[in-house]
Image (cartoon, grey):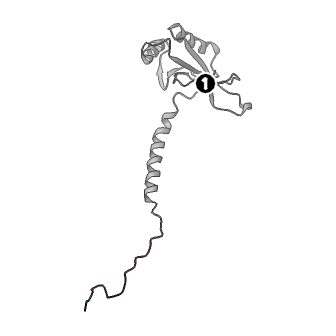
């Protein structure tokens, strides 16, 4: 006679687990949330400027330009860094590594600024050897677009 310690002919059956383990999915989602929270502020570069509207078509270009902003107080910025208007060409040459002829510079000027202020800054940039200087405007609201476009 053979005796077993498991109780003879009784079979031990395990129940199937019908619950979905969502812990790994929650972990992945939290990591993605943190990544997006950190990277989202980096996507908006520049100073808050109220751009004028224009109906010219948008430029299609893949090269990343240097953005020069002039806020409503007349302060000049390269990206988010404030610079003096007199030292602007030197700072731009330092950023472009002396490659002024090929560098693209987008100028964003607040629409409340006098036209002469924006033209003075653009002239200073152009006179220092930069050939690709462009004004940035918004599409008129009647076309259904409110995003910044370059002209």
Q: Is residue 17 magenta?
A: no
Residue 28: give x, y in percent of width and height: 44, 51
Element marked by disc 1: loop
The quadrant of the picture occupied by the C terminus is top right
Residue 30: give x, y in percent of width and height: 45, 51
Residue 53: give x, y in percent of width and height: 68, 25
Location of mark 1 (residue) = 60
Residue 27: give x, y in percent of width and height: 43, 54
| Residue at the (47%, 64%) spot, across then down | 20
Name the residue at the bottom extreme: 1
| Residue at the (65%, 24%) spot, across then down | 58
- Quadrant of residue 97 within the rendered picture: top left
Observer-nearest of 104 and 94 = 104
The quadrant of the picture occupied by the N terminus is bottom left
- Quadrant of residue 147 within the rendered picture: top right
The magenta region covers 4-16
Name the residue at the front extreme: 1
Above or below: residue 3 compared with residue 127: below
10 Å crowding of disc 1: few (<14), some (14-19), many (20+) = few
Observer-nearest of 143 and 41 = 143
Observer-nearest of 7 and 135 = 7
- Quadrant of residue 4 within the rendered picture: bottom left
Majority secondary structure of the magenta segment? Answer: loop
Name the residue at the right extreme: 142
| Residue at the (64%, 15%) spot, across then down | 115
């Amino acid at each position: 006679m053979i005796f077993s310690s498991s109780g003879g002919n009784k079979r031990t059956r395990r129940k199937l687990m019908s619950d979905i383990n969502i812990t790994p999915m929650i972990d992945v989602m939290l990591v993605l949330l943190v990544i997006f929270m950190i990277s989202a502020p980096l996507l908006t570069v520049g100073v808050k400027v109220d751009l004028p509207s224009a109906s010219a078509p948008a430029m299609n270009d893949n090269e990343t330009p240097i953005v020069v902003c002039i806020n409503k107080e007349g302060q000049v910025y390269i990206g988010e860094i404030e610079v003096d208007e007199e030292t602007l060409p030197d700072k731009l040459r330092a950023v472009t590594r002396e490659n002024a002829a090929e560098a693209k510079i987008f100028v964003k000027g607040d629409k409340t600024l006098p036209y002469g202020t924006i033209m003075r800054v653009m002239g200073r940039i152009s006179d220092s050897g930069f050939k690709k200087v462009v004004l940035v405007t918004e599409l008129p609201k009647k076309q259904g677009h409110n995003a910044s476009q370059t002209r």
